[in-house]
């Protein structure tokens, strides 16, 4: 579809109309799109897809490997034990339970809808950001291919990229906890480890027992043996001057914490990450489907494909081949107008809109009806522009926005800033059309093609897939 913007309308219509004739038996939009892509895919396209898939696998494998190794090293460091002392339960619970739950909470906050500064800051600390590191290990052709794809379509794939990033983060978390569990089991199997807890604060064993009971609630009903008892809590307490286990205690008791620790690591470390990973994969699939559904030019593509099908059913293949101009004419009109839909019109270039005949002419030329009219841009202050944006944003409706501009005046940076602010305040998929118009004696006239090319370059430089240029020409409804 990106290449289609460089193809003339007539050639584009002929190509897709021919493909549509071959897809007459296809009724599903997804199957039509898949067949259309297959028919147009070149060797370079297939090579690019292979490179992107290879880069994706490399990043995923890197996340798994790094997460697993860090999980192993973390538990190995926490379980440093030479037989003379005890492994500190307090540190284990802080690192393996408290910190993990804190990271899960921050991840959920970062996933919430919106783009506030705290959320953006939290996303910067996501392990998914390590993708850049792993992509450096990929061949240069793969790095360039992925970079070009994301660079050209950053706004279109923003939601896909967001959930892919979160998905990699959760994959890292799952690998980390898996490595921690494996290392914990191996250390317990090959060593006789004694666990204990100690604190300078005045904490009674009953308080620690309440904490362990609270942490054990997920399994206390079906694994009561792995819920620490008061005798185990009391026996595990030690003080800094107590060098060895006293003879009055049973040393084998101090190793009975391992089941509790492994279940804590599973329920508070691995399980939340698994659930978040599956949730991210679900949201990623939804984001991909949503992106495909709202991809700019998708509806125009189906119009071209299905118009051929309709005409074939009505008059046969020969009728379509002999009368291409009618379908092409209707297609061109549908691509450039609002299909008589209501719009919010922003008068950017200070047109005189008080004259009712001129308003009627504008609506006929653009094939739209004006729902609301706002003044912005020329002869307006910045705070007035901001109020217009806020007013449109407060409506909450996804009514298309048309920005009326003078075709002969070159686009300036103020308009680009206005469009960017409007996009940020409303919806990324809000349809915004630049409406270059030329007037003479108070009436619309044909704009200069060179002026329209300038506006099209301006629109293309903004890299906004839902922004387009629709020149207003007199007598559009009669063409």
Image: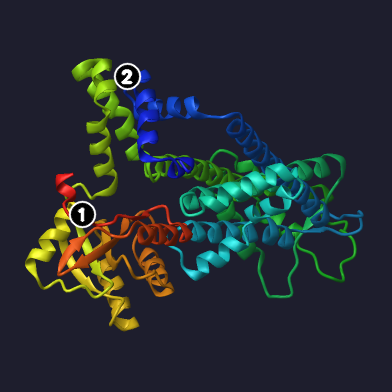
Q: Is residue 177 visible?
A: no
Q: Is residue 158 visible?
A: yes
Name which quarter of the figure residue 34 lies in: top left
Up-down: is 464 above or below 334?
below
The mark total stands at: 2
Up-down: is 289 above or below 400?
above
Name which quarter of the figure residue 459 lies in: bottom left
What separation in Å lies between label 1 and label 2 (alpha carbons)? Answer: 32 Å
| Mark 1 closeness class: few <14, some 14–19, many ≥20 residues within 10 Å | many
**Residue beneath the point at 60% across and 40% down:** 223
Name which quarter of the figure residue 246 lies in: bottom right
Residue 161 appears left or right of 188 = left
- Name the one closer to the observer, 26 or 208: 26
- Name the one closer to the observer, 135 or 93: 135
Q: x and y percent of residue 311 in the render?
A: 23, 23
Up-down: is 383 above or below 429?
below
Q: x and y percent of residue 455 in the render?
A: 38, 61
Quadrant into which the N terminus falls: top left
Q: x and y percent of residue 163 in the render?
A: 52, 49
What kind of element bears circle 2?
Answer: loop
Q: Which residue is mark 2?
A: 24
Q: Earlier in the sequence, mark 1 or mark 2?
A: 2
**Residue beneath the point at 48% across and 60% down:** 461
Quadrant into which the C terminus falls: top left
What kind of element bears circle 1?
Answer: helix
Q: Which residue is mark 1?
A: 366
| Mark 2 closeness class: few <14, some 14–19, many ≥20 residues within 10 Å | some
């Amino acid at each position: 579809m990106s290449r289609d913007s460089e193809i003339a309308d007539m050639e584009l219509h002929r190509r897709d109309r021919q493909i549509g004739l071959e897809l007459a038996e296809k009724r599903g939009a997804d199957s039509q799109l898949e067949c259309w892509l297959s028919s147009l895919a070149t060797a370079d396209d297939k090579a690019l897809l292979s490179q992107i898939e290879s880069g994706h696998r490399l990043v995923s494998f890197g996340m798994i490997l790094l997460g697993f190794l860090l999980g192993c090293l973390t538990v190995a460091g926490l379980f440093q034990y030479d037989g003379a002392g005890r492994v500190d339960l307090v540190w284990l619970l802080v690192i393996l339970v408290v910190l993990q739950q804190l990271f899960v909470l921050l991840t959920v906050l970062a996933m919430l809808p919106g783009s506030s500064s705290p959320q953006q800051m939290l996303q910067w600390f996501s392990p998914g950001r390590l993708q850049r590191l792993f992509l450096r290990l990929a061949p240069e052709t793969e790095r360039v291919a992925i970079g070009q794809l994301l660079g050209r379509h950053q706004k279109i794939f923003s939601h896909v990229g967001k959930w892919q990033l979160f998905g990699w983060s959760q994959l890292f978390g799952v690998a980390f906890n898996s490595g921690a569990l494996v290392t914990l089991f191996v250390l317990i199997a090959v060593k006789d480890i004694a666990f204990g807890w100690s604190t300078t604060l005045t904490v009674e064993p009953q308080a620690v027992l309440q904490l362990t009971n609270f942490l054990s609630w997920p399994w206390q009903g079906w694994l009561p043996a792995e819920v620490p008892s008061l005798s185990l809590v009391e026996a595990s307490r030690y003080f800094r001057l107590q060098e060895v286990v006293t003879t009055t205690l049973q040393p084998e008791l101090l190793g009975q914490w391992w089941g509790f620790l492994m279940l804590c690591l599973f329920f508070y470390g691995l399980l939340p990450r698994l659930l978040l990973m599956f949730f991210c994969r679900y949201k990623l699939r939804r984001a991909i489907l949503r992106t495909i559904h709202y991809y700019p030019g998708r509806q125009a593509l189906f119009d071209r494909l299905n118009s051929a099908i309709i005409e074939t059913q009505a008059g046969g293949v020969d009728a379509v081949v002999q009368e291409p101009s009618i379908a092409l004419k209707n297609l061109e009109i549908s691509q450039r107008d609002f299909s008589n839909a209501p719009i919010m019109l922003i008068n950017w270039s200070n047109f005189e809109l008080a004259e009712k005949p001129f308003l009627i002419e504008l609506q006929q030329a653009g094939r739209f009806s004006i729902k609301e009219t706002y003044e912005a841009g020329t002869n307006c202050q910045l705070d007035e522009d901001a109020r217009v944006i806020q007013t449109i944003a407060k409506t909450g409706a996804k009514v298309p926005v048309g920005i009326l501009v003078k075709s002969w005046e070159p686009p300036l940076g103020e308009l680009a800033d206005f469009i960017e602010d409007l996009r940020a305040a409303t919806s990324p998929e809000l349809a915004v059309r630049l409406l270059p118009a030329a007037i003479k004696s108070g009436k619309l006239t044909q704009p200069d093609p060179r002026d329209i090319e300038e506006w099209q370059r301006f629109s293309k430089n903004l890299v906004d897939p839902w922004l387009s240029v629709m020149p207003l020409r007199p007598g559009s409804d009669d063409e």
